[in-house]
């Protein structure tokens, strides 16, 4: 629960400064093209109320996912669990994959649907799915 | 009494191994999602962690991982669902859960320190599992 609150506050605080800068710039310039470092807001001019953030998984989420995977598969600390490593490469069979997804569900307090769970093959997939669900929940 | 909270419906037999596999994973997900309830019912918060219970369930599933007949898998799943229903509707008691799922085989034997010194490796393996 605490980790979820932290993740949501981190997301909102990182978005707010850029949003304020954007709104001031839009009101003064009234132009669509502006350069923002980092995130893109494609639909901001049309619907100013709605915020669309398309960023890849945050590193802290990724780290947590890696930790859970390592603990679940009982890997020694020497093996490198990177974002692109597949679960099957790390020695997990299908039941292990489901168990890892369940562990992530418990850790982040989310609920993964079955068909989205089928598509998870790498660590990066899992982290992205978690991000999406956390955002939807918050 | 509501003894059939999650009614044990008997669906038609799985057509293929693939469908049986899906059912196994569905059962595993249902079991994992009911673990917080179980820990609540039997007050297991200080005794065991949810991850341990998850791995115990996974180990039970893995015990039969070499079965290939879908009907046998269905039968095993039926028994598993029945067990899960019994546990979640509090038809069991705390010592049942602790003895069957929290304490492993080693836990029961770890008191017999000096008695086990003379036991052969064959016996130790024999106590652990059928297949070695």
Image (tube, coloured by chain):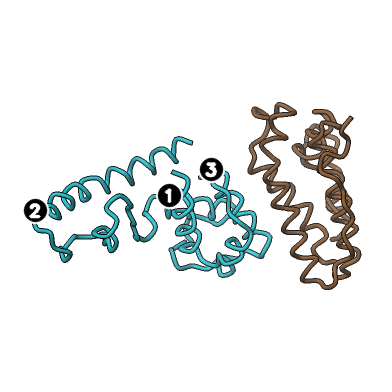
Disc 3 secondary structure class:
loop
Residue under circle 1? A135
Q: Tell me, by letter, which chain the rendering colours cyan.
A: A
Q: Is residue B3 above or below residue A18?
A: above
Percent coordinates x, y for residue B52 in the rendering: 67, 42
**Residue A84 placement, left or right of B123:** left
A36 or A130: nearer the viewer:
A36
**Residue A33 placement, left or right of A84:** left
Disc 2 secondary structure class:
helix
- Cα distance between the residues tagged 2 and 1: 31 Å
Residue at the spot x=87%, y=45% of the render? B82
Q: Chain of mark 2?
A: A
Q: Is residue B7 above or below residue A54?
A: above
Residue at the spot x=37%, y=61% of the render? A56
Q: Tell me, by letter, which chain the rendering colours brown.
A: B
Residue under circle 2? A28
User: CB under 8 Å between callouts 1 and 3?
Assistant: no
Percent coordinates x, y for residue A53 in the rendering: 33, 57
Foreground tag (2 vs 1): 2
B119 or B53: nearer the viewer:
B53
Q: Is residue A42 above or below residue A27?
A: below
Q: Chain of mark 1?
A: A
User: Of label 2 and label 3, which has the lower sequence position?
Assistant: 2
User: Of label 2 and label 1, which has the lower sequence position?
Assistant: 2
Foreground tag (1 vs 3): 1
Percent coordinates x, y for residue B43 in the rendering: 71, 26
Can you say which quadrant of the picture contains the C terminus of chain A? top left
**Residue B120 placement, left or right of A52:** right
Residue under circle 3? A109
Which quadrant of the figure has residue B7? top right
């Amino acid at each position: 629960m605490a980790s979820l609150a932290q993740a949501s506050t981190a997301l909102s605080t990182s978005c707010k400064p850029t949003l304020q800068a954007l709104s001031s710039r839009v009101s003064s310039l009234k132009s669509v093209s502006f350069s923002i470092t980092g995130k893109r807001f494609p639909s901001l001019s049309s619907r100013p109320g709605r915020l669309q953030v398309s960023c890849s998984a945050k590193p802290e989420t990724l780290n947590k996912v890696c930790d859970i995977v390592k603990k679940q598969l009982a890997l020694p600390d020497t093996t490198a669990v990177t974002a692109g490593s597949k679960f099957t490469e790390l020695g997990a069979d299908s039941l292990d994959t489901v168990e890892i997804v369940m562990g992530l569900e418990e850790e982040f307090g989310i609920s993964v649907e079955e068909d989205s769970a089928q598509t998870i093959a790498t660590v990066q997939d899992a982290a992205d799915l978690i991000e999406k669900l956390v955002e939807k929940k918050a | 009494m509501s003894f059939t909270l999650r009614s044990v419906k008997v669906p038609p037999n799985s057509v293929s191994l693939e469908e049986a596999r899906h059912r196994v994973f569905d059962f595993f997900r249902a079991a994992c999602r009911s673990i917080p309830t179980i820990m609540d019912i039997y007050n297991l918060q200080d005794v065991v962690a949810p991850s341990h219970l998850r791995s115990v369930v996974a180990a039970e599933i893995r015990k039969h991982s070499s079965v290939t007949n879908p009907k046998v898998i269905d039968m095993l799943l039926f028994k598993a669902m029945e067990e899960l229903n019994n546990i979640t509707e509090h038809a069991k008691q705390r010592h049942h859960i602790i003895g069957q799922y929290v304490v492993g085989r080693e836990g029961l034997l770890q008191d017999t320190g000096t008695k086990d010194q003379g036991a052969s490796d064959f016996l130790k393996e024999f106590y652990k599992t059928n297949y070695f």
